[in-house]
């Protein structure tokens, strides 16, 4: 869909995504399957296009956070297996089964509900058992004193007639952190996960077909944790130190174009609150990019963007729809000139650091008002604008 008014867009390089996938496949080896994490609209990159690319490239599984995200993929022709990492209400179990969607099971009460609902229609629901090994969020608690009880519950739930326990998984909370303490914590989580699987499989008398735990940090750093399948998100999109180490490329380039140029004398206050005062005769560019597009207001007076003449400082408070940049020494940058907010030239990691946050938050923050432009072989293959322009 052509966006006419907005001049800010996110280029999604599907070739880079396919190359990242290939490089990661090489890194994990032929015996390990690949689950692409495409929750939150594929970290802001567009889950349908990203999933299509991964499906074509031969990925094994996708994961999302909710049934709505899963249905978005099914509705758009994604046929590969999809796991829902979060909760699904019991009255939606039939829909899960009808659409061949796999559900995470995180506790006994949910296992009972899911099994009962599946039995009502004479079917079974494919599930992955979630073990809490130290993230302390979702999953059967199995650490320390909880080990025996946790095993007992998982075995019971694996035997429920309405459930088909295809997989078992856990989530690391510190696999991307530096230092001995984090390393020890991850090692403990992994050992506990293996112990739980061994104990459950022995009692149950069957084996899980898919054991998985490796997120970005573990996929990159700890090959022993790859087991049957890895589950990276950020790494796949090419952000962070591990991506750099593995030679992966950033998939998104967020771009905008200078909308207006103004000339101010020294001493001029710029934007709300007057937090920036020009210290010289200043040539100021206005960008149609503000916090409603995903430019965190906390980056006011801290961000830099990339122009054809190098980095330009963002000045004054970031507004809802606009922000200002100093173009005084960049004479060739004028109205209509393209500016990269982050991407291949201006790493998102630097912007995240300036905002005191992580790249995850910045790519997820790119709002639905920003059209995604999908590139293959340098050509635009699709434009997607998630606004309600049709009645
Ligand atoms: C989001 C998520 C991932 C991916 O995390 P990254 O740090 O982006 O690799 C993996 N597993 C679960 C359960 C998740 O929620």
Image: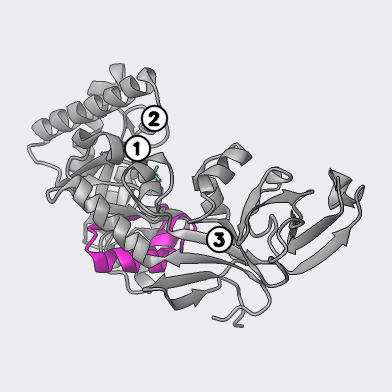
Q: CA distance from mark 1 to mark 2?
A: 8 Å
In the rendered image, is residue 97 in sight? yes
**Does residue 60 show up magenta in the picture?**
yes
Quadrant hosting residue 207: top left
The answer to which of 155 and 381 lies nearer the viewer is: 381
User: Magenta region: which residues?
Assistant: 41-70
Q: Are marks 3 and 2 in contact (CB under 8 Å)?
A: no
**Does residue 192 show up magenta in the picture?**
no
Q: Are marks 1 and 2 in contact (CB under 8 Å)?
A: yes
Q: Is residue 390 left or right of residue 228?
A: right
Label 1 beta carbon within 8 A of ligand 1? yes
Q: CA distance from mark 1 to mark 3?
A: 25 Å
**Other-residue count near label 3 (Cα within 10 Å), few / some / many at <14 / 14–19 / ≥20:** many
Q: Which mark is residue 254?
A: 3
From the viewer's perspective, is residue 5 above or below residue 132? below
The residue at which mark 2 appears reads as 174
Query: Quick one: label 1 or label 2, which is nearer the N terminus?
Result: 2
The answer to which of 23 and 43 lies nearer the viewer is: 23
Of helix, strand and loop, which one carries label 2? Answer: loop
Of helix, strand and loop, which one carries label 3? Answer: strand
**Which residue is painted at 34% across and 58% down in the image?**
93
């Amino acid at each position: 869909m052509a966006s006419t008014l907005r001049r800010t867009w996110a280029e999604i390089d599907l070739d880079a995504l396919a190359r990242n996938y290939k490089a990661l496949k090489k890194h994990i080896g032929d015996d390990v399957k690949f689950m692409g994490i495409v929750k939150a609209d594929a970290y802001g990159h567009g889950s349908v296009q990203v999933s299509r690319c991964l499906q074509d490239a031969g990925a094994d599984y996708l994961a999302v956070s909710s049934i709505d995200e899963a249905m978005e993929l099914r509705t758009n022709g994604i046929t590969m297996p999809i796991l829902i990492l979060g909760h699904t209400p019991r009255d939606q179990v039939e829909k899960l089964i009808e659409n061949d969607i796999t559900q995470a099971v995180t506790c006994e009460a949910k296992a009972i509900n899911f099994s009962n609902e599946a039995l009502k229609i004479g079917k079974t629901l494919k599930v992955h058992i979630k073990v809490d090994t130290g993230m302390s969020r979702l999953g059967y608690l199995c650490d320390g004193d909880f080990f025996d009880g946790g095993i007992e519950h998982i075995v019971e739930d694996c035997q429920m007639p309405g459930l088909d326990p295809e997989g078992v998984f856990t989530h690391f909370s510190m696999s991307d952190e530096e230092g001995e303490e984090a390393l020890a914590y991850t090692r403990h989580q992994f050992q506990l996960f293996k112990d739980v699987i061994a104990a459950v499989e022995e009692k149950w008398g069957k084996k899980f077909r898919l054991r998985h735990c490796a997120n970005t940090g573990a996929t990159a750093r700890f090959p022993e944790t790859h087991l049957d399948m890895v589950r990276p998100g950020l790494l796949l999109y090419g952000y962070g130190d591990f991506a750099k180490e593995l030679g992966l490329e950033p998939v998104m380039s967020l771009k905008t174009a200078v909308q207006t140029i103004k000339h101010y004398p020294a001493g001029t206050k710029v934007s709300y609150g007057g937090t920036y005062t020009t210290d010289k005769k200043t040539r100021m560019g206005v960008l149609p990019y503000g916090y409603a597009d995903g430019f965190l207001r906390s980056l006011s007076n801290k961000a830099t963007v990339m122009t054809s003449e190098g980095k330009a400082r963002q000045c004054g408070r970031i507004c809802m729809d606009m922000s200002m940049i100093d173009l005084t020494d960049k004479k060739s940058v004028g109205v209509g000139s393209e500016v990269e907010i982050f991407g291949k030239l201006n790493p998102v990691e630097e912007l995240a650091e300036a905002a005191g946050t992580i790249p995850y938050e910045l790519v997820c923050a790119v709002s639905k008002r920003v059209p995604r432009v999908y590139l293959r072989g340098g050509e635009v293959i699709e434009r997607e604008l998630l606004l309600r322009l049709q009645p």
